[in-house]
Amino acid sequence: MKILFFGPNGSGKGTQGSIIKDKYGIPHIETGVIFRENITGGTDLGKKAKGYIDRGELVPDNITIPMILARLQEDDCKGGWILDGFPRNLTQAQELDKALKDLDITLDIVIEMILDRQIAKDRIMGRRLCVNDNNHPNNIFIDAIKPNGDKCQVCGGDLKTRSDDQDEDAIDQRHNIYYDTETGTMAGVNYFKDLSSKNDGIPRIVDLNGQQDLKKVTAELINKLG
Ligand code: AP5
Ligand code: MG
């Protein structure tokens, strides 16, 4: 199954993607995670990406697009994938569509998670990342997934805060890009919706209510993926 996972920044894509990846046995590819691993590792890619990420801007397409298209051609992607955080603008959507056609790969499903912008912002500011698995749910503002003191509520691992999560201007900038229907992420969502309507419903478009508690979101998602 080849899946694109859209949703506002902080809506729960990473959290749900990591559950779905285990259920369907396919890799969960998160562009933001790839960049952050490169920043931590001090690579050239990480050095180039850091400033953009700290400001909440997109890393330029000439870096991001080839990086993801190469990742999708690795061996573990042959049986499918969940792509989370890409495409993020209209150009990335068009380039991905073109590359998939060239490679004779059919995109099966496009998920659009829906969540109010302010709720997503609050989730970002309360998020804490577990050093053992950055998608272990931990959020200081949400009782059901509150950390145990300063430790991960799932595994007891140490927690850290993403540097771009505490800067309100950077969060607003990320959301401005997401909700932009001209050239931003929503323009990418609409690109795939158009494609679907002209192509007998392929890829299948799935909407997902991100406002429910975490387990209900998972249940709705699994039900709709089939
Ligand atoms: P990225 O890492 O993708 O960050 P983001 O877009 O800001 O999205 P998030 O990871 O914040 O949100 P999420 O939906 O995964 O939420 P999560 O599951 O963690 O990108 C970072 C940066 O990298 C970008 O700003 C850009 O600079 C660069 N970049 C990335 N992709 C790029 C691209 N394609 N092109 C160019 N640049 C790119 O959940 C959030 C919190 O809510 C957690 O605490 C979680 O535990 C909690 N939570 C989850 N679900 C629920 C629920 N149902 N109820 C209550 N709490 C919940
Ligand atoms: Mg994420």
Image: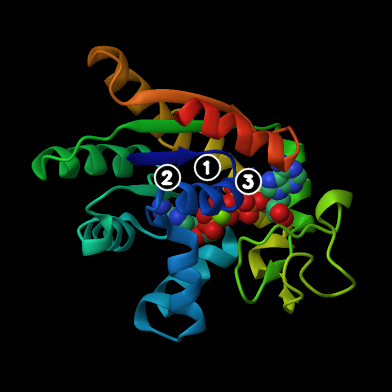
Specify the label residue 129 is tagged with: none
In the depicted structure, whether residue 157 falls above or below residue 76: below
Q: Answer left or right for 219 relative to 90.
A: right
Foreground label between 1 and 3: 3
Determine whether label 1 and label 2 are within 8 Å by CB. yes
In terms of depth relative to the viewer, which is nearer, 170 or 116?
A: 116
Who comes first in sequence, dot 2 or dot 3? 3
Q: Residue at x 49, y 61 (%)?
A: 32
Q: Answer left or right for 84 relative to 175.
A: left
Q: Give, as a three-letter code, the residue at label 2.
A: Arg
Whether the residue under disc 2 has CB within 8 Å of ligand 1? yes
Mark 2–mark 3 distance (CA, rounded to whole Å): 16 Å
Q: Position of residue 208 (x, y in %)?
A: 58, 28
- The residue labelled by disc 1 is 177
Who comes first in sequence, dot 1 or dot 2? 2
- The residue labelled by disc 3 is 12
In terms of depth relative to the viewer, which is nearer, 196 or 177?
A: 196
Q: Position of residue 188 (x, y in %)?
A: 38, 33
